[in-house]
Image (cartoon, rainbow, N blue to C red):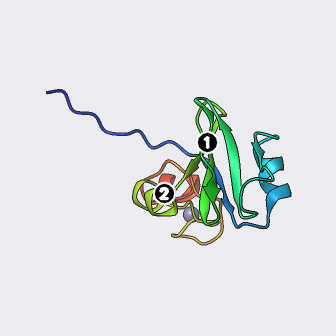
Amino acid sequence: MPRFRKRPVVIEAILWSGDNYDEVMAFTKGNAGNFTDLRDDTIIIKTLEGDSPPVKKGTWIIKGVEGEFYPCDARILDKTYDRVPEKCPACGRNKPEPTHPDFLCMTCIRNP
Ligand SMILES: [Zn+2]
């Protein structure tokens, strides 16, 4: 049986907090909505496969590699993604390379 390893892809995501509707709408370029028959703290995401089921607050909305949007349970995001730190963990100064296994910056990668 052939085996596969997921490539390190970098995605952007926003956490649906239940009250950041405008932020989620801006992030998804309008591919989100809520409807009056849903509880106030749920949102619908327009995904490649159509409208998502109601998304509960505390769920991440991911922008995928094709620019598509989809909800992702916080527990699943935790298991499958590492959060890219703001700064390189070695020098604490530069922006990390998001695909480097240790998130080093280009300077620290070139001068180990
Ligand atoms: Zn560095």
Task: Respond yes or no on whether mark 2 lies under 8 Å from ligand 1.
Answer: no
* Left or right side of 102 for 27: right
Secondary structure state at the residue bearing disc 2:
helix
- Badge 1 crowding class, 10 Å Cα cut-off, few under 14, some 14 to 19, many 20 or more, is some
Residue sitting at x 57%, y 57%? 105
Asked if 64 appears above or below 76 in the picture, the reply is above
Q: Residue furthest front?
A: 37
Tell whether label 1 touches label 2 (CB within 8 Å): no
Count of picture labels: 2
User: Residue 1, image x and y in percent?
Assistant: 13, 27
| Residue highlighted by disc 2 | 77
Name the amino acid type tagged 1: Ser
User: Residue 2, image x and y in percent?
Assistant: 18, 27
Residue sitting at x 28%, y 34%? 4
* Left or right side of 3 for 75: right
Quadrant location of the C terminus? bottom left
- CA distance separating discs 2 and 1: 17 Å
- Badge 2 crowding class, 10 Å Cα cut-off, few under 14, some 14 to 19, many 20 or more, is some
The residue closer to the viewer here, 64 or 72, is 72
Name the amino acid type tagged 2: Leu
* Left or right side of 107 for 67: right
Query: Which label is found at residue 78?
Result: none
Secondary structure state at the residue bearing disc 1:
loop
User: Residue 98, image x and y in percent?
Assistant: 55, 51
In the image, ligand 1 is in what quadrant? bottom right
The residue closer to the viewer here, 4 or 100, is 4
Residue sitting at x 53%, y 70%? 89
| Residue highlighted by disc 1 | 52
* Left or right side of 81 for 30: right
Specify which label sits upstream in the sequence, 2 or 1: 1
Residue sitting at x 61%, y 66%? 58
